Image: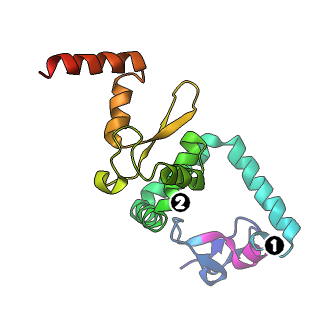
């Protein structure tokens, strides 16, 4: 093979003076080993901080290019990334759930578990136990004020949601059932 040119120092060297690269068309990096060690493997922490700062500035100034880079990386490594996500979820279910309720309701996992204990692990409406339901209870909250009310089973949570979280509509539904269940 012929000599390759280094993009940094512009020197021409044999391929053995370059690191191999599967991502480049020529099969070798565009900087020779000497330039890589000089520029990319800066020994001082200040140089590394400066390089990171420059990289973060580029990312901030080029959000579309960065998004495209991330998309290409994901498509190239999709199976591996998806498997890592599944493995993380499998090994961290409690943490995942804790992050979810923190994001949605501002409730920590400890506060959620305290509510469960306070309700004796039962739905606040129908009284079914978590073991009977087969799932943890849902956090019921006022959608306008975001105030947490109690923990409900899936059916009760969906039921009051379908009745528009309205006590008036719920009373009308109760009257309807009393009148027409005879």
Q: Does the magenta portion include 140?
A: no
In which image quadrant can residue 134 be found?
bottom left
Locate residue 162: give its quadrant: top left
- Residue 123 drawn at (x, y percent): 39, 44
Residue at 79 percent of width and 61 percent of height:
51
Residue at the location (81% across, 72% down)?
42
Q: Is residue 126 above or below residue 145?
A: below
Near mark 1 (Cα within 10 A), the count class, few <14, some 14-19 or many ≥20, is: few
Residue at 63% in and 81% down:
14
Q: How many marks?
A: 2
**Residue 136: where, in percent of width, then height?**
40, 52
Q: Which residue is mark 1?
A: 42
Which stretch did the figure color magenta? Answer: 29-38
State which tag comes first along the sequence, 1 or 2: 1
Q: Is 149 placed above or below 175 here?
A: below
C-alpha distance separating marks 1 and 2:
37 Å
Q: Is residue 59 left or right of residue 74?
A: right
What kind of element bears circle 1?
Answer: loop
| Quadrant in which the C terminus is drawn | top left
Residue appearing at x 35%, y 17% in the figure: 169
Mark 2, residue position: 95
């Amino acid at each position: 093979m012929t000599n390759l040119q280094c993009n940094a120092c512009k020197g021409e060297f044999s391929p053995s003076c370059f690191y191999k690269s599967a991502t480049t068309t020529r099969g070798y990096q565009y900087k020779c080993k000497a330039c890589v060690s000089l520029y990319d493997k800066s020994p001082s922490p200040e140089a590394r901080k400066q390089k990171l700062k420059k990289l973060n500035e580029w990312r901030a100034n080029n959000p579309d290019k960065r998004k495209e880079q991330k998309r290409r990386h994901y498509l190239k490594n999709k199976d591996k990334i998806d498997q890592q996500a599944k493995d993380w979820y499998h090994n961290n279910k409690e943490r995942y759930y804790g992050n979810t309720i923190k994001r949605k309701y501002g409730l920590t996992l400890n506060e959620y578990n305290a509510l469960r204990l306070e309700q004796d692990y039962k739905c606040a409406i129908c009284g079914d136990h978590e073991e009977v339901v087969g799932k943890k209870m849902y956090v019921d909250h006022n959608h306008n004020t975001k105030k947490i009310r109690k923990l409900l089973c899936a059916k009760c949570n969906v039921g009051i949601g379908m009745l528009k979280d309205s006590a008036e509509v719920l009373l009308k539904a109760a009257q309807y059932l009393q009148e027409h269940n005879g």
